């Protein structure tokens, strides 16, 4: 008997979310109670949705904080959450949200229009250097309290992804708690309106949340209309992949993320477990390439990197057991194939080691005595930092064959980001779970260089800036799509990024965990409906 395999994906043609379970046994009625043990592969940076964009942080604080609206994975439309209705002005520059009147923060203070204005202003306070990569940076103007439960958010100019951003990144923190503990400490003492309240955080060990018994405002996409079923969520931080799997099999945890491919394939055949695959929309596992640091400041070197790696071989060697599940496929461009705006014509670098060598030869990089190319006494070296192992080491061997010495270092995600910001490295991963291609502007627009920005290629390309600004304000969806295709094609021609493979959600739960679902991106869990068979 096989375990259930839930597959969360987005059909490229229909752009419709779907989930399926194979050989699912009859499910009894949900029962409240119990503690859900959930394991993450890395510690969050801070539990503050206004200021953090780290995925492991989001997985936790999405349970504590809630958005005004939500995108339904089934039909891709926006549904109410903390807002009951909304209107967009004819010029696309003002969004008026009517709010629920029965919501309170975990500290007992009311959620209202003043709270929304506080959150919007705080997210866009330049002094706080928010790392919310998907927020309306450069577009947000102000928020106006129309009445106690009506807020109007104004943009400097129309921004097409605004509702998408509101459904994912803009989550409401308690203004009273921020005033009590300060902007920098809220991330350690978070207070929101969500299904779960914060209890404690022991760095690099555990985060504990408890059920919010007063929660009665679940959005229509949730089955459970009352408080969450599980009493507590105990998030354990286990960085070593094999240790995560060992903890799962020993019964110490109920949900394990980032399960190694071989273990995933093995556990998927065991009826004691449920294997979950979330096919990610947005940006696959790509590497931002620093265009300001020698030698990747040379176009020929960046293009040689793209020609020099064999993505098919990487997918087979590192993620082979996941291939039958349709996960972790090779990536040849900046958007996954299920993301709106994807265009196969932007996949312009197939593996061609001969072409890679020709480019380097023409640029003056000649083979040295040890096989590594040199120019003017400089060896052709580049430093890659990543929080994941496997693919970088295969890339290292492949690139050595074209005469490039790739230095690989594995470190936690926060250290990876800081190494690139300094900059001490040439390449760093930039995957992103998102449904709108505007996410690329967070990685490529010049306004996102420095500070809390995520332009880790350090690209300042006026042509790209202009395209992204046009696309963000374009109301004609066909024209908007054409602009993003143009932006991706230009980015690939100039080799600002190195796409390698898809980055999907590969998780395993014990069979007694029921109704665990993921959001529209396929990556962020919804725990409100989760319950456990005794």
Image (cartoon, helix red, strand yellow):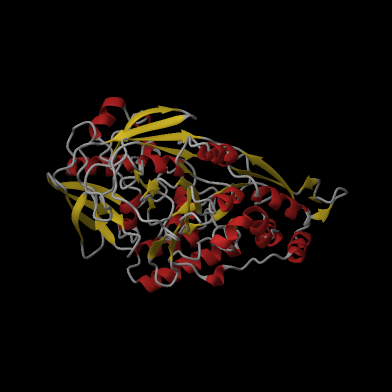
Q: Does residue 457 appear anywhere in the picture?
A: no
Which residue sits at x=52%, y=64%? 488
Q: Nearer the viewer, residue 119 or 142?
A: 119
Report the residue that reaches farthest toward the left.
147
Task: Report x, y in % for residue 100.
Answer: 16, 48
Locate residue 47: give its quadrant.
Answer: top left
Q: Nearer the viewer, residue 31 or 464?
A: 31
Task: Report x, y in % for residue 304.
Answer: 70, 59
- Where 415 falls versus 328 (above or below)? above
Q: Nearer the viewer, residue 196 or 193?
A: 196
Q: Does residue 220 appear anywhere in the picture?
A: yes
- Where 47 falls versus 397 (above or below)? above
Report the residue that reaches farthest toward the front.
1
Task: Report x, y in % for residue 76.
Answer: 33, 63
Residue 408 as seen in the image, left or right of residue 488: right
Q: Nearer the viewer, residue 413 or 122?
A: 413
Residue 127 as seen in the image, left or right of residue 178: right
Instruction: Locate the C terminus by quadrant.
Output: top left
Residue 192 as seen in the image, left or right of residue 114: right
Locate residue 522: give its quadrant.
Answer: bottom left
Task: Report x, y in % for residue 215.
Answer: 22, 41
Numbered disc total? 0
Which residue sits at x=58%, y=68%? 347
Locate residue 327: give its quadrant.
Answer: bottom right
């Amino acid at each position: 008997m096989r375990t259930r395999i839930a597959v969360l994906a987005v059909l490229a043609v229909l752009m419709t979310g779907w989930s399926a379970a194979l050989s699912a046994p009859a499910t009894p009625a949900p029962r409240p109670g119990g503690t859900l043990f959930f394991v993450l592969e890395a510690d969050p940076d801070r539990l503050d949705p206004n200021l953090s964009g780290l995925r492991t942080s989001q997985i936790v604080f999405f349970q504590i904080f809630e958005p005004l609206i939500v995108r339904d994975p089934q039909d891709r439309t926006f549904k109410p959450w903390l807002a009951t209705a909304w209107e967009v002005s004819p010029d696309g520059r003002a969004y008026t949200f009517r709010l629920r009147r029965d919501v309170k923060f975990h500290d007992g203070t009311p959620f209202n229009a003043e709270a929304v204005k506080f959150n919007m202003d705080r997210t866009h306070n330049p002094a706080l250097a928010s790392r919310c990569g998907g927020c309306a940076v450069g577009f947000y103007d102000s928020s106006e309290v129309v009445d106690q439960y009506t807020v109007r958010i104004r943009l400097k100019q129309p921004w097409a992804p605004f509702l998408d951003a509101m459904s994912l990144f803009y989550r409401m923190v308690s203004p009273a708690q921020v005033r009590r503990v300060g902007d920098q400490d809220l991330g350690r003492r978070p207070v929101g309106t969500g299904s779960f309240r914060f209890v404690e955080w022991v760095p690099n060990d555990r985060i504990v949340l408890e059920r919010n018994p007063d929660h009665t405002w679940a959005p229509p996409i949730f089955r459970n209309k009352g408080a969450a079923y599980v009493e507590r969520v105990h998030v354990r931080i286990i960085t070593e992949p094999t240790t995560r799997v060992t903890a799962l099999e020993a019964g110490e945890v109920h949900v394990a993320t980032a399960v190694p491919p071989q273990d995933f394939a093995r556990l998927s055949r065991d009826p004691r477990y449920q294997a979950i695959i979330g096919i990610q929309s947005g940006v696959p596992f790509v590497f931002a390439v620093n265009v300001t640091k020698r030698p990747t400041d040379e176009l020929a070197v960046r293009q040689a990197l793209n020609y020099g790696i064999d993505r098919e071989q990487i997918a087979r060697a590192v993620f082979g057991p996941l291939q039958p599940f349709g996960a972790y496929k090779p990536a040849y461009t900046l958007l996954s194939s299920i993301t709106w705006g994807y265009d196969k014509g932007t996949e312009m670098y197939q593996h061609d080691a001969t072409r890679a060598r020709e480019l380097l030869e023409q640029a003056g990089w000649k083979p040295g005595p040890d096989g590594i190319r040199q120019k003017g006494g400089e060896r052709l070296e580049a430093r890659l930092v990543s929080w994941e192992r496997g693919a970088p080491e295969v890339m290292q061997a492949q690139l050595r064959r074209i005469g490039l010495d790739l230095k690989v270092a594995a470190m936690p995600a926060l250290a990876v980001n800081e190494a690139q910001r300094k900059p001490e490295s040439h390449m760093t991963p930039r995957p992103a779970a998102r449904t709108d291609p505007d996410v690329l502007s967070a990685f490529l627009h010049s306004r996102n260089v420095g500070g809390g920005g995520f332009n880790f290629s350090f690209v300042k390309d006026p042509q790209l800036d202009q395209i992204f600004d046009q696309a963000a304000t374009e109301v004609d969806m066909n024209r908007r799509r054409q602009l993003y295709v143009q932006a991706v094609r230009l980015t690939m021609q100039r080799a600002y990024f190195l796409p390698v493979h898809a980055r999907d959600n590969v998780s395993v739960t014990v069979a007694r965990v029921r109704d665990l679902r993921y959001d529209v991106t396929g990556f962020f869990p919804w725990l409100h409906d989760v319950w456990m068979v005794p």
